[in-house]
Amino acid sequence: MEAKSCQVIPPPLPSASLVNTPPPNKVSLPAKLTRAISITAPVDLVSTRRDVDDSAAAFWDYQFLFVSQRSESAEPLALRVVDGAIPPDIPSGTYYLTGPGLFSDDHGSTVHPLDGHGYLRAFAIDGVKGEVKFMARYIRTEAQAEERDSVTGQWKFTHRGPFSVLKGGKMVGNTKVMKNVANTSVLWWGGRLFCLWEGGDPYEIQASTLDTIGKFGVACGGKLPSRQGREMEVGVWDVVAAMLKPILYGAFKMPPKRLLSHYKVDAGRNRLLIMSCNAEDLLLPRSNFTFYGMHVYKYNFF
């Protein structure tokens, strides 16, 4: 099979004649926002035409899918229903959702969505009153504390991440590759809330305020389990791994055990199953996984 180079050219923007744009001064913001918020668009501003090129529309929809969120909602905000209705039999509770929230900083750098800082949202549902309240906070990870100025609120990316390149292509000499942004999944276990990332320890969150409590060490506290009493065959990849470890652990400051964000709750035995992989296996044609089983009793880990 012969490989040929190709160039992908994005579809052009739809013609202005096919897109309804709001007239000047059609949309205005109130001088003072109320506690109840809603986001909607006037019916007369929504285009219902079907003759827009589907491929072009899909392309530009994707471009606008990942938009940085610059604001937080530390206090609960009541959401107003703008379409449909809250089911009368909906159970009361809180739905937590984490994901990347910031993709571009204030200095021209842009990161891949997988490297976006974790943005935690909470939807508190009151099934009796039929009300929903919303909160949103950035997870205060170590990377977030380094890349966001607490005084000015400006962002400056210093970690290029495994999928991103900083402005100017600062690849050489930048060993800040992996940053735990806690943007992958949410776990409620033992009466405690955690935000996970694919490759590091989870961050514990105060469920009622979304304040970040701190990093929660799971994977042996970053230490490898002892092999005493076990005879292991040493192969060529073990030699290569031994050479990579001081580089990855030292220069790149990677933890020996990279906790994964996927988990399984065994309700029958009331236990949590999670796993980790070795950092050096990212560069080797092999995988070593360590499985952890945690039981809960009276809201404590054992």
Image (tube, helix red, strand yellow):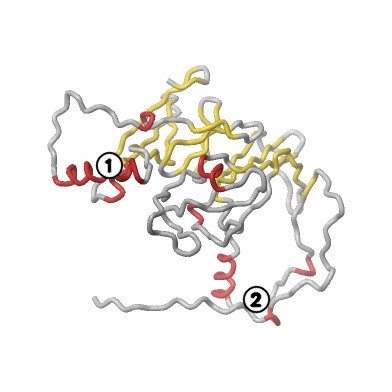
Q: Position of residue 14 (x, y in %)?
A: 63, 78
Q: Position of residue 106 (x, y in %)?
A: 61, 57
Which circle, 2 or 1, is nearer the viewer?
1
Q: Position of residue 7 (x, y in %)?
A: 42, 78
- In the image, 223 versus 57, the foreground residue is 223
Quarter that holds the N terminus: bottom left
* Pointer 2 residue: 50
Q: Secondary structure at mark 2?
A: loop
Specify the quadrant of the image occupied by residue 21.
bottom right
- In the image, 121 versus 150, the foreground residue is 150
Q: Residues within 10 Å of mark 2 (few under 14, many from 20)?
A: few
Q: Is residue 256 left or right of residue 186?
A: left
Amino acid type of the residue that numbered disc 2 sits on in the rendered structure = Arg
Residue drawn at x 38%, y 55% is 173
Asked if residue 236 is positioned above or below residue 3 in the image, the reply reads above
Amino acid type of the residue that numbered disc 1 sits on in the rendered structure = Lys
- In the image, 147 versus 287, the foreground residue is 147
Quarter that holds the C terminus: top left
Asked if residue 191 is positioned above or below residue 281 in the image, the reply reads above
- In the image, 280 versus 290, the foreground residue is 280
Asked if residue 25 is positioned above or below residue 142 in the image, the reply reads below
Q: Is residue 258 left or right of residue 203?
A: left
Specify the quadrant of the image occupied by residue 27.
bottom right
Q: Residues within 10 Å of mark 1 (few under 14, many from 20)?
A: some
Residue drawn at x 56%, y 69% is 58
Q: Earlier in the sequence, mark 2 or mark 1?
A: 2
* Pointer 1 residue: 245
